[in-house]
Image (cartoon, grey):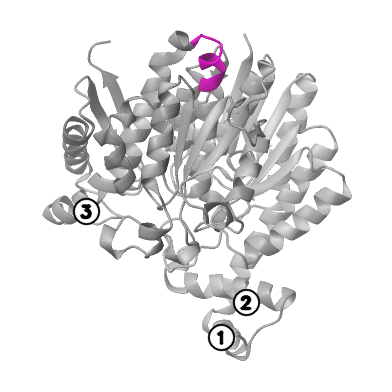
Amino acid sequence: MTKIVFLPLDERPCNYDYPKQLASMTELDVVLPQREILGKKKLPAQFSNIRDWLVQETRSADYLILSIDMLVYGGIVPSRLHHLSENEWRQALNVIREMKENNPSLKIYAFNLIMRAPAYNNSEEEPAYYSKFGRAIYRYGWLMDKKDREGLTKIEREEQDKVVREVPDEILRDFLNRRKMNAKINHMSIDLVNGGLIDFLIIPLDDNSKYGFTSKEQRTLIFNIEEKNLFDKVHIYPGADEIGCTLLARVFAQVNNYTPLIHARYSSTQGPLIIPKYEDRSLNESLKAHVTAIGGILTDTSISADVHLFIHSPAVGETEVAEQGPYDERHRSYFSEINIREIVHVMDYLLKENKFVALADVATCNGSDRALMKLMAKIKLHNRLHAYGGWNTSGNTMGTVLAHGIIGSFYFNRNLWEKVANNSRKFYTTRIIEDWGYQAVVRQEVVKKDLPRYSANYFNINGAQKSIEACIQERLNNFVNSELQWKDVEVSNVQLPWKRMFEVGFQVDFKNT
């Protein structure tokens, strides 16, 4: 049995549980650390614990899926807060060399994010000063990058002068110094690929845009990759929390000598060309990046496809993409340039033809498109799909759906579906309940109706966590019974891991199994 050691980006369900659930469908032996040693939100993991666990487990492993952010900084949020010395981060990176020396046949598939710079004032996952200066810091990076690439308009030059005056020197210095160090570690990671210590590397672009800090750093990394002729081994594209699933599916495909053919069909004619919110390139370019990273091939014909991937796509980009608000407040293109009837009709047809069908629901951010899901439920299509995702960003959804699709289709198309059907259904069921039930429906209900009763707010449920988790659990089970009509499914053990409403974890059980 192939042993894979897996060090996740952090301890949240999307980074810890999703890959674990996908692995349960396979014959891979995937070993994760105890969740308790991975830190929690702004509290970094202890390097000594991570190092000891990695060195011990990789001695007998075939593959290591490695979050460099976890190894070096102690997690995704600590990567934005740290004050590491060069000696400290070099010590962390040296663990990679140590593992390779102990086990020369170990294949290391790593990922390391470009540090984000959100476009809003909020210090929930950033330094404390981001609550006051976050937007200005983002605009500073945006304007500096645009100035270097294209020049600024008169209004933009005036804004730049204002931003420079607004952000105190010591705050900007702290932010820029951390970015500089993180960028250096990204370049060092590329050097490790060039030296044969890392076999495959993804550098995800976390919450990025056309201009900004991330865009500028991405270009310097690409120049480095080109100079070293490493385009086959180092991939850069929008994403973050789904990358662990992507790399797991890549290993699965390689171990099984499987090159999946994927046919994509969009709900919107404009969809392939739209730049999604929080990303810097067209949806179709991102799709190609995800498919290539996972080891698949996009095919123009559906006849030979292993995975029939449907992409429910927006017809407008970036700022006009719908969030989870009232349907009648959406951009007009949602009513004229997207055809949910057509993709539901085609999915229904292909499922009746016994094809493997997956759906990436990215027309809205931070949850499913309720209009599409209600139509699917009306004809019981949600009972027959094989893979689904509609969570957070386009990249998060795309990577997760493809990972499930690649693993599931391997068994499905070889008449081995019964072997994995139960575990595949459990992951699929979890995605439907979380992405539609929680993100698109229950979260808003709890925020409006339950949080006020406990004097809690979206970002702080301290003191009422157990009560709010109970409210969520009750509402999710009501959703399962009423909207999904899944009488054999029960949600339990609901948890809000970061004591806020953004992410949720829960257990799904089938009553009759």
Residue 20 in the image, given as x and y percentages of width and height = 48, 24
Residue at which label 2 appears: 143
Neighbour tally class for label 2: few under 14, some 14-19, many 20 plus, Cα within 10 Å: many
* Picture residue at 42% right of the left edge, 33% below the top: 347
Q: Is residue 497 magenta?
A: no
Q: Mark 2 to mark 1: distance in Å?
A: 8 Å
From this view, report whether residue 513 is shown above or below residue 480: above
Neighbour tally class for label 3: few under 14, some 14-19, many 20 plus, Cα within 10 Å: some
Q: Mark 3 to mark 2: distance in Å?
A: 35 Å
* Picture quarter with the N terminus: top right
Q: Secondary structure at mark 3?
A: helix
Residue 447 - label:
3
**Which span of residues is magenta-colored?**
408-416
| 179 left or right of 420 in image | right
| 495 left or right of 483 in image | right
483, 293: nearer the viewer? 483
Earlier-in-chain disc, 1 versus 3: 1
